[in-house]
Amino acid sequence: MDPEFKYPRWQRLLEAAILEFDPVQLCVRLQEVEEAISTRLQELTSQKGGQDEHHALTKAILIMQLLEKNRRVLRQSLSEIALQHGVDC
């Protein structure tokens, strides 16, 4: 077991997304963590127990939604700044 994470299979990917500042790379990282979470949720439905991890996955999904919202806002802000400076992006 990883000493940093209780559920490293998907928590490492979530951490990478949280720490990503590039909006394009964030999109990639969010897709990776979304796939890992989806896979894990499917696995948990066929297993007994796992309530703690399911709860952690639910929180992770909420974090991902916030990251995606922030990514969209950042991208829009960058576009507006570029337009103000006559740069096409």
Image: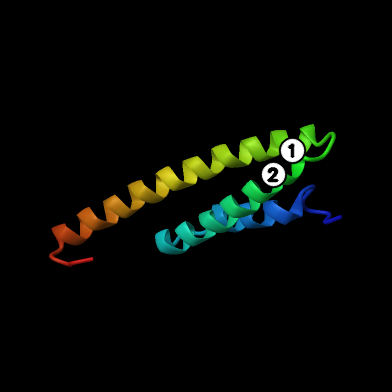
Q: Position of residue 50 (x, y in %)?
A: 80, 37
Q: Residue furthest front?
A: 46
Tag 2 and tag 1, C-beta contact below 8 Å: yes
Observer-nearest residue: 23 or 50? Answer: 50
The residue that mark 2 highlights is: 42
Q: Residue at x 28, y 51 (%)?
A: 76
Q: Residue at x 41, y 43 (%)?
A: 69
Q: Secondary structure at mark 2?
A: helix
Q: Position of residue 49 (x, y in %)?
A: 84, 34
**Left or right for 32, reference 1:** left
The label on residue 45 is 1
In the displayed structure, 54 sits above or below 71; it is above
Q: Amino acid at mark 2?
A: Gln
Q: Amino acid at mark 1?
A: Thr
**Left or right for 89, reference 50:** left
Q: Which quarter of the figure has residue 75?
A: bottom left
Q: Residue at x 36, y 49 (%)?
A: 72
In the displayed structure, 15 sits above or below 43; it is below
Assign the N terminus to one quadrant of the image.
bottom right
